[in-house]
Amino acid sequence: MARVVVGLSGGVDSAVSAHLLQEEGHEVIGIFMRNWNDESVLISEECPWVEDSADALMVAEKLGIPYQVLDLSDPYKERIVDYMFREYEAGRTPNPDVLCNREIKFDLFLKAALKLGADYVATGHYCRKEEVDGPEGKTYRLLSGKDPNKDQSYFLCQLTQEQLKYALFPIGDLLKSEVREIAKEADLHNFDKKDSQGLCFIGKVKLPVFLQQQLKPRTGKVIDIAPDSPLFDERSKIIQIADGREEQLKAYSRKIPYQEASGVEIGKHEGAHFYTIGQRKGLNIGGRKEPLFVIHTDTRSNITYTGEGEDHPGLYRKGLYIGNPDIHWVRPDLEMDEGEERDYLVRIRYRQKTQKAKLYKEKNGLYIIFDDEQKSITPGQFAAWYADEELIGSGVIA
């Protein structure tokens, strides 16, 4: 049997993970990661980490396992929160959950666990790991969780083979309902605790409110782009006349060069860096027949561009591009060579159903061209590609 350090979050998923490992006869140690301690940015009177830590302690006491709190707040601020601010300020939309797994849980937390003599670390993620023999030894496959509504493999899309080597996901083969039932039968007090939502490390605070602590409001224009704008005809023409493979790829993944003169001013906003592509709420502009969506943000000029209606052409693109420095292969043995093309299933956000696409590796990076146009392709988010259930690689959308 192995020594396993479990990241106890205070929630039911990690609690059941610890319970299942203990039932299998492993030596289990529970550690709660404290990732945030800047009370000046909490805003809310509620302090979630205190409640979560108390819940984690109660689980550890119930199971009779050692428990400690690991303060990772300084590196978390540096690696995750500061990065979030920089990305939003630059007009991109980062994914802190993906970064937290890569930089905190399976880096700093893993290293701390290994110092305790751990053979593995375990988390309450809904995903699976499979070990297979490869030409150069063991290869670790990252697979989707069995619960289609809770599959969290996307959040682990930046993990390496070395990180997966030490990872265990005890509830990956279970449905959420089964996890709660196991917790109830084991008399774990948090069997019906609600899942955490949003920015769990700072309390029940909306993202724009949090961002305003460092990114100051700047009044700017909201420019509405009509669905029949010549800009979209121009995009179609560029795709039609593109000559050669690389030119075609660039044309499909090309962003529309919106300009103030392209549309009509319909209101004001408090900072383009507070908005993200596809956002519907928060514009506070009424009097429209259909809902308004953000289709582009220009943080330099501080202009937010909108389009009316779910089917607005500004919301959709056929492809995206990932630069070489931002390409990551969970399976490095399957890395694509320059000039190669390959069919994969791709998702560009958590819980999105995987989409059929073809990946093209060029000298400057990777192009992903979808069978069907995709809504709200957002710079700064991660695109992850799968072969059936296995997550093969990922990258930051340019």
Image (cartoon, rainbow, N blue to C red):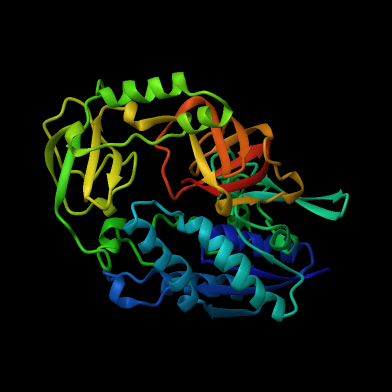
State the residue at coordinates (46%, 58%).
96
Side (left or right) of 286 relative to 240: left
**The one of 201 and 85 positioned closer to us in this rendering:** 85
Q: Is residue 187 visible?
A: no
State the residue at coordinates (65%, 41%).
146
Residue 7: quarter of image? bottom right
- Above or below 182: residue 240: above
- Above or below 20: residue 29: below
**The one of 164 and 2 positioned closer to us in this rendering:** 164
Name the spot of residue 231 as percent of width and height, x first. 29, 27
Q: Is residue 258 visible?
A: yes
State the residue at coordinates (34%, 56%).
90
Name the spot of residue 304 as percent of width and height, x first. 23, 44
Considering the image in quadrants, where does the N terminus appear? bottom right
Residue lying at the far front of the rendered structure: 243
State the residue at coordinates (66%, 75%).
111
Side (left or right) of 126 relative to 239: right
Name the spot of residue 109 as percent of width and height, x first. 61, 72
**The one of 28 and 131 positioned closer to us in this rendering:** 131
**The one of 330 and 322 positioned closer to us in this rendering:** 322
Side (left or right) of 321 relative to 231: right
Q: How many marks?
A: 0
Name the spot of residue 270 as percent of width and height, x first. 17, 54
Residue 24: quarter of image? bottom right
